[in-house]
Image (tube, rainbow, N blue to C red):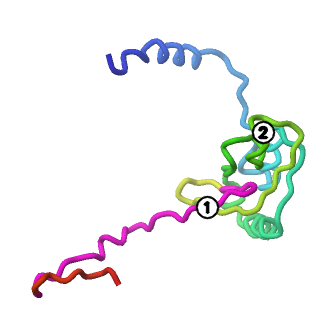
Amino acid sequence: KGGAGAVDLGKAVMSACQQPSDFKLLYDAKNDSIKTKIEKIVREVYGGDEVKYSEKAEKIIAQYGEDPEIRSLPICMSKTQYSLSDDANKLGAPKGFTINVKDLYVSAGAGFIVVSLGAINFIPGLPIKPAYYKIDLDFSTTPPRILGLS
């Protein structure tokens, strides 16, 4: 039946959207400081008590805070999937923990600041133009020569 199985769910969501709501954003992205945004997420969403910043993170926050376009971006937290803390050994939803911010970077295309917590490592992104565009075959020789691999 394909998507027909989701018709009732769709109707329920549409009905819920018609109801009054007291929804409000967790923080004011335009006016709250970067640290205020991070601390609200840690305390009000994750259930943590404290946020500690590495020396590197402090420097980046100070730099980003100088630019109104950057400091007004929303926050995306990068952390272990095993816990609401930054410690993969504190499974589930522990309470009263300390979050350690080790690094931050701007994801300009997506429009947010990525905050790295604990032992998370960033994987480099792909280039705009993949390297295979530089690989070719030169058929003027026998056998053909592969170009662009060195």
Kindly identify the amino acid type of the residue bearing the numbered disc 1.
Phe
Looking at the rendering, the stretch of residues picked out in magenta corresponds to: 114-141
Q: Under tag 2, what secondary structure?
A: helix
Question: Residue 46 has which mark?
Answer: 2
* Up-down relation of residue 138 to residue 116 (above or below): below
Q: Under tag 1, what secondary structure?
A: loop
Q: How many numbered marks are there?
A: 2
Give the residue drawn at x 58%, y 16%: 18
Picture coordinates of residue 58, whole percent (x, y): 82, 66
Within the image, what quadrant is residue 73 found in? bottom right
Picture coordinates of residue 112, whole percent (x, y): 63, 54
Q: Nearer the viewer, residue 122 or 82?
A: 82
Q: Is residue 74 left or right of residue 147?
A: right
Q: Tell me if mark 1 has few (under 14), some (14-19) or many (20+) residues whose alpha carbon lies within 10 angstroms of its own.
A: few
Q: Main secondary structure of the magenta part?
A: loop
Kindly identify the amino acid type of the residue bearing the numbered disc 2.
Tyr
Q: Is residue 137 left or right of residue 32?
A: left
Q: Is residue 100 left or right of residue 69?
A: right
Which residue of the protein is positioned furthest toward the bottom in this rendering?
141
Question: Residue 63 has which mark?
Answer: none
Q: CA distance from mark 1 to mark 2?
A: 21 Å
Residue 89 belongs to the span the image colors magenta:
no
Give the residue drawn at x 19%, y 78%: 137
**Sequence order check, earlier mark of 1 and 2:** 2
* Up-down relation of residue 124 to residue 7 (above or below): below
Split into 4 quadrants, where in the image is the C terminus? bottom left
Residue 123 belongs to the span the image colors magenta:
yes
Within the image, what quadrant is residue 140 found in? bottom left
* Up-down relation of residue 101 to residue 43 (above or below): below
Picture coordinates of residue 99, whole percent (x, y): 82, 50
Picture coordinates of residue 88, whole percent (x, y): 73, 46
Question: What residue would you read off at disc 1?
Answer: 122
